[in-house]
Image: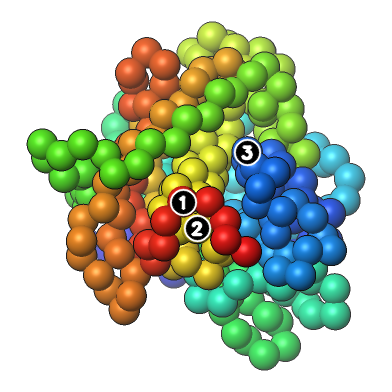
Amino acid sequence: MSIPGAGFEYPPQEVSWLKRDALLFANSIGVKADELHFLYELHPDFAVFPTYSLILPFKHTDQETIDFYTRFQAAPIPGVPKFDSRRAVDGQRKITILKPLPPTSKGKKFELRNKVIGVYDKGKAGTVIESEQAIVDKESGEVYTKIVSSGFMVGQGNWGGPKGPSAINYPPPRDKKPDAVHVVQTTAETPLLYRLNGDYNPLHATPEPGQKMGFGGAIIHGLFSWNAAAHGILRELGGSDPNNLKEFQARFASPVIPGDRLTTEIWRTGNIQDGFEDVRFVTSNNSGKIVLSNGRCLLKITGPKSKL
């Protein structure tokens, strides 16, 4: 049986960023003052935080706010129903960093290339759309990052499609204490700052969308928690060196409410691939509920904080 939507490609989309965008992103995910190479544009090792690519499918080339619902109306995918993007949440993300982004896109032309991997019917719960997004130098064709994403269309299932493959799980080691722990205290303002990167979904700013979706009100971007965990792991075990992160992934297990305290427990496995260690993690809120599961990254282990 063929997979619905597989291979469908969206039109390429130009993307761009300034040093100011990189600074805002680093601030919004909790980068600390002793990591100035992410926070000060005149630092000799100034760098874009390595997961910044994830914001570009939202930002495009914009330096102004946008109407999120108009921009991100679910584009028709051949062979599947049309979905309501106002009732969509993140499923999971995986980024593979092939080459670090320059501090600004100025002087180059970058584009987002986005293709569907598959569309899967999960019954009454909804539909999963899995896609691969690449950030590419338009002129040379060189790929800087690849992102595999799954979006969940809440309550929009039962259209007769396949359930899709079982997910690969990456559990943390059993009966072993974490090798590092990173804590982030969110506030009511956390999503209001993060959205300025370009992800202007009203779900994260005003209570009405979240109330309609059963969340009780506004929730924090799943990608804030995802990126904050990436920062915590890079800081605690990777010396805050952007070159030490190769892959990073996690599943969005439950919503995060503004004011939640997020604790990321991090385990080394000792499994090395080309100098990068397989690291596992789980992020929980202050009630102990897991908000990021299936956490895994490939990281060069150097120790805590920045030495740059």
Q: Residues within 10 Å of mark 2 (few under 14, many from 20)?
A: many
In which quadrant is the N terminus drawn? bottom left
Q: Residues within 10 Å of mark 3 (few under 14, many from 20)?
A: some
| Residue 178, percent from left and from top | 26, 39
Q: Residue tagged by mark 1?
A: 304
Q: Which label sits on residue 30?
A: 3
Give the answer, above or below, for where 138 lies relative to 149: below
- Would you say residue 78 is visible in this rendering? no
Residue furthest left in the image: 175
Q: Amino acid at mark 2?
A: Gly
| Residue 238, percent from left and from top | 45, 58
Q: Residue tagged by mark 2?
A: 239
Give the answer, above or below, for where 74 lies relative to 79: above
Question: Which quadrant of the structure image shows residue 217?
Answer: top right
| Residue 260, percent from left and from top | 51, 18
Give the answer, above or below, for where 280 lies relative to 110: above
Residue occupying the point 67% across, 27% down = 190
